Amino acid sequence: MAPPPVKYRAIKKPHRMHITTLRIENFRNLERVSIHPHPRLNYFFGSNGAGKTSLLEALVVISRGKSFRTVHAEELEGPATEAFRVFIETESSGRSHKLGLERSGKQWRARMDGSDVALLSVLSRHLPLVLMEPNSHLLVSGSPDVRRRFLDTGVFHVEPAFLDVWRRFARVLKQRNAALRARELRVLDSLDELYTELGEKLHRYRRSYCEKLFAEFAAQEAAAHTAEQEGIALEYASGWKGEGLAEALAATRSRDLERGASGQGPHRADLMMTRDKRLIRTLLSRGEQKGLAASLLLTQARLLASMGGLPLILLDDLASEFDRAHVHSVLDAALGCSSQVWVTGTARAELQEAHKMFHVKHGQVQEMV
């Protein structure tokens, strides 16, 4: 017997940037898709393996230049050719933009408003998004790099200089690690000044963003009174011991030389979540971790919206991840951000909010009337 449809409450909010057209060619099992989504809420339903998640994945790829399901880009190619294409049109305050991304063989090509763009970050900056999917609980229980990516996604959209500093630091980190393995002390001396300068810049960007994120999270906690958030303390850990990175590098150089890797720096930063000074991942069930991750992701969405970077909100397989009360809570919060919301599920839903509904079957997407 099919599960009963989920009923969603209506939320009225003004809307700004949204996708007006989405076209996908040869992306996984999506041979050819062309839809005109609703500016407010879009719901895609169908059986497992039909292509619902792949549709959201295509949006993530054009926004971030990579998938959340695989690190192997060739896995995204459908059976028709070795190339896939994703094209969208967006509208914001009466202005429209066209974005396209193509991968053919090992070559990527990105375009915006008819012109080639050299960096995929150009598309990322125009199309911020927040994704909630079945592995989002790893934001709470996973490794620190998951939480760093979460923070850096937010910083990228509010601090224009962040990406350049992050790239420069990544290069210097690679050079420093090579010098450590080769035990080239003079090279280390020359690198550590720039390493410190860039590392502390990254730290300041992240710390500034975290101050805003934590304040927004605390305000949400006070309003929602959810069990997952009660008594939770958030803290940004810089990635080194002590006040200054230069001092931390000097104090741990011998250890770094033994390991052949840099143990102090922003590449070791973390978002610490505790309750009564205990790490939250040891206290919460998997379901509670999902709830907390949802709160953090939607906090980021609200913060980006308040700072002028209204993101798309993608909720993959929402009803299977939460009970009915949490489904209502998550969707209401998403719609409350004034974002365009995309939801997938296995069963058709009853929606009170203005929306469009699409049936996904064998890689074909059909709008339901």
Image (cartoon, rainbow, N blue to C red):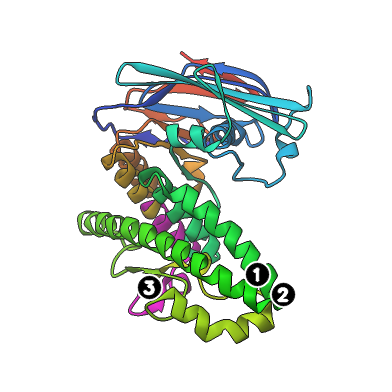
Q: Residue at x 56, y 35 (%)?
A: 120
CB under 8 Å between discs 3 and 1: no
307, above or below 363, in the image: below
- Give the distance between the C-alpha atoms of the residues marked 3 and 1, in whole angstroms: 32 Å
Residue located beneath label 2 in the image: 181
Q: Residue at x 64, y 63 (%)?
A: 174
Q: Residue furthest top?
A: 369
Callout in the foreground (3, 1): 1
Q: Is residue 213 left or right of residue 33?
A: left
Q: Amino acid at mark 1?
A: Asn
Residue located beneath label 1 in the image: 177
CB under 8 Å between discs 2 and 1: yes
Tell me the crowding category of disc 2: few under 14, some 14 to 19, or many 20 or more residues within 10 angstroms, Cα based.
some
The span shown in magenta is 274-295
- Give the distance between the C-alpha atoms of the residues marked 3 and 2, in whole angstroms: 36 Å
**Secondary element type, mark 2:** helix
Q: Is residue 261 left or right of residue 350?
A: right
Where is residue 12 shown, x and y percent of the image?
A: 24, 29
Q: Is residue 167 visible?
A: yes
> Is 293 included in the stretch rendered in magenta?
yes
Tell me the crowding category of disc 1: few under 14, some 14 to 19, or many 20 or more residues within 10 angstroms, Cα based.
some
> Is 102 included in the stretch rendered in magenta?
no
Residue located beneath label 3 in the image: 274
- Among the two numbered marks 3 and 1 on one chain, the one whose residue lies closer to the N terminus: 1
Q: Amino acid at mark 2?
A: Arg
Q: Residue at x 32, y 63 (%)?
A: 229
**Secondary element type, mark 1:** helix
Q: Is residue 262 visible?
A: no
- Give the distance between the C-alpha atoms of the residues marked 2 and 1, in whole angstroms: 6 Å
93, above or below 321, in the image: above
Q: Amino acid at mark 3?
A: Thr
Callout in the foreground (3, 2): 2
